[in-house]
Image: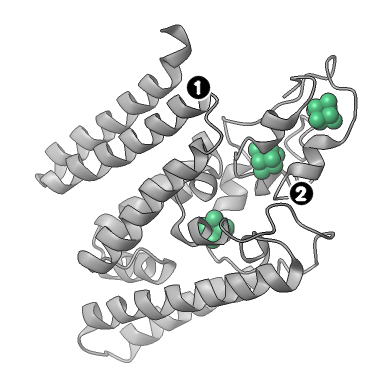
Amino acid sequence: MKKYAAPLLLLAVFEAVAVSLWLAKGNLFYLFNFSYIGCSIALGVFLFIRKYTHARRVVQLLVGLYMLVYLGLICGENMQIEGFWYYLFTGVFEAATIHYAVAKIFGPLLFGRGWCGYACWTAMVLDFLPYKTPAGPRKRLGWIRYVTFILSLLFVAGLFLAHVGNLERIMFWAFLIGNGLYYAAGIALAYAFKDNRAFCKYICPITVFLKPMSYFSLLRVKCNKEKCVSCGKCKRVCPMDVDVTDNSRSRKHGTECILCMECVKNCPKGAL
Ligand code: SF4
Ligand code: SF4
Ligand code: SF4
């Protein structure tokens, strides 16, 4: 039973958030939403402990599809970064702002870029592509993320400054079109660079929040130097080019780690 403490603890944390928000906001949606996400993540960790190969993918599909199909398409919530700016400007602390605060701004202090490994609906599709580990060295294109970040902010600020009407409807269409563009760019880049996660490395605006916050993450993969034989397998299987053998916070590409655990699964010495 002791080995299942982690999924039980995660479930308890999500339930605490679910109940607190339900009572604070008087909205049953929060109870359902965070309970569902907590159950999905706890199930994934449980499957991982049971050494099920596709544990991460199960969580990614459960959470990613829920957010894309149910919250995005059915409920009409724009959970893209434009939706975050939109709700921030309107001063409404609702689904998209809460989602960003929990998963992408303050949550990474605790669980790093777990969002990117286990929940993102963009990566959920990209991870089906054939280039699970990058075929070549990383390109110097990370600056593009700042451009997309600023463009998303300017787009929403422009709508407010121009006093455009029917903003809810526009944000719904922005969600549909934005997602279409993300998928198209992500798939094209994956094939061009032979790297499923090229979009995450160079384009995704959300990494402007995720990278600095995950630098301080409590949850990290660490290397036991006494067991490590420097075979390099962990670096070869890492989709994000992280030097996981370096335990310092400034490890190479450390803020890119998506906690996918491929390095842990593949280390022949159990050093990670
Ligand atoms: S970097 Fe962006 S697109 Fe990639 S998994 Fe993270 S949030 Fe999703
Ligand atoms: S795979 Fe394991 S043994 Fe090999 S370099 Fe990485 S941590 Fe060390
Ligand atoms: S393989 Fe290891 S270091 Fe690389 S992203 Fe996954 S968990 Fe992080």
Front-most of 97 and 271?
271
Q: Quadrant of residue 19?
A: top left
- Please state which amino acid type lies under the numbered disc 2: Asp
Residue 7: x percent and y percent?
Answer: 41, 23
Residue 140 visible here: yes
Residue under the point 42% across and 47% down = 103
> Secondary structure under badge 1?
loop
Question: Which residue was labeled with disc 1?
Answer: 50
Residue 101 visible here: no
Front-most of 191 and 121?
191
Q: Quadrant of residue 16?
A: top left
Question: Which residue was labeled with disc 2?
Answer: 241
- Please state which amino acid type lies under the numbered disc 1: Arg
Could you classify mark 1 by the number of other residues whose Cα lies within 10 Å: few (under 14), some (14-19), or many (20 or more)? few
Of the image marks 1 and 2, the number of the one nearer the N terminus: 1
The tally of labels here is 2
Residue under the point 60% across and 71% down = 187
The circle on residue 103 is none
Residue 66 located left or right of residue 193: left
Tell me the mark number nearer the camera, choosing from 1 and 2. Answer: 1
In which quadrant is the N terminus drawn? top left
Ligand 3 has an atom within 8 Å of the beta carbon of the residue at disc 2: yes
Above/below status of 81 relative to 118: below
Residue under the point 26% across and 56% down = 95
Q: Looking at the image, do the residues carrying marks 1 and 2 touch, with CB atoms under 8 Å apart?
A: no
Residue 45 located left or right of residue 223: left
> Secondary structure under badge 2?
loop
Above/below status of 136 relative to 133: below
